Amino acid sequence: MKQGFEVVVIGAVGIDTNVYISANSVDFVLEASFTENLDYIGMAGGYSSKGFARLGKKTAFIGFIGDDYMGRHIACELQADGIDTKGVFLDSMGTKRSVNLIFSDGTRKTFYDGKGSMQLKPDLEICRRILSGSKFAHFNIVNWSRYLLPIAREGGLIISVDLQDIVDIDDTYRSDYVEFADVLFFSCVNFDDPTPFVKAFLKKKKDRIVISGMGKRGCAVGTKDGITFFPAVELQDPVIDTTGAGDSLAVGFLSSYLIDSYSLEDSILRGQIAARYCCTKKASSSELITAEELDRLYRSFRA
């Protein structure tokens, strides 16, 4: 029986611990520092699935958790958000964890424990049933997710992929994700100009959309018609935590463009609004932007 989800998110989920530091560096001379430490559901799959659900989209999640307290907490929270969890499998090594040092300007340094991600393989038949009849699949690049790329393609789904922080256009780990993606996201954090990357990705598949998040510089969008740069949007509240901003950019864009049929330019604006809103919250995966707030802010920018 076909599920008919609007979006199936495929990726990593775990518990993040954010350590909020009052400076822009760590003073290692001091043995201890006073910080604010917050735990929450994070990682790209967690942020993306909760983000789509927060916008009222019919969402399924495929991923792995541990048979432990944190894994059970994640499953309960996703279900409480209305997210289908039939594709949530068990990792015998436990639930993934990240520790993020968040500096006073909102930037961060992440320490990631992926548990068994490199050895895991999902139940392909269960995943096939979840994907069947759904509109699109949003992939994060946790290793086991690559096994589902051909299944999503065979099922006729639109495939979006977030490559995250890239340094090499020809990175072999990401090559199959690049090959399959109809919509491709990546972060420009490691270089000043995303243009060579956007052009290279379009050369491989000219009819796709390529979006590069550039932080406070905005974003770049590439299509067969060329590359357009969009300035960052500003909201009244300051940037305090950039964790999840890239995921929110993707969620805001994809939900607007693929589900709600906004134009490319308007969908980019809505994605940027969602990303900037995310940056105003600490440990924000339970406070992501709602459809009502996104619509309100979008109207204010278009007024």
Image: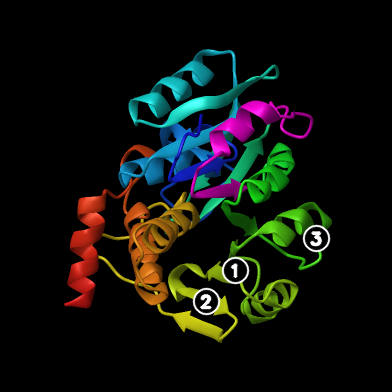
Q: Secondary structure at mark 1?
A: loop
Q: Secondary structure at mark 2?
A: strand
Residue 270: image location, x then y, percent = 34, 65
Residue 59: image location, x then y, percent = 43, 39
* Quadrant including the C terminus: bottom left
Snapshot quadrant of residue 111: top right
Magenta-colored stretch includes residue 121: yes
Kind of residue indicated by mark 3 = Asp
Residue 230: image location, x then y, percent = 43, 79
Task: Tell me which label, 2 or 1, sits earlier in the chain.
Answer: 1
Q: Secondary structure at mark 3?
A: loop
Q: Which residue is mark 1?
A: 188
Q: Which residue is mark 2?
A: 220
Residue 232 vertical position relative to residue 136 in the rendered view, above or below: below
Residue 131 vertical position relative to residue 297 in the rendered view, above or below: above
Residue 226 vs residue 235, the one in the foreground: 226
Q: How is the image coloured?
A: rainbow
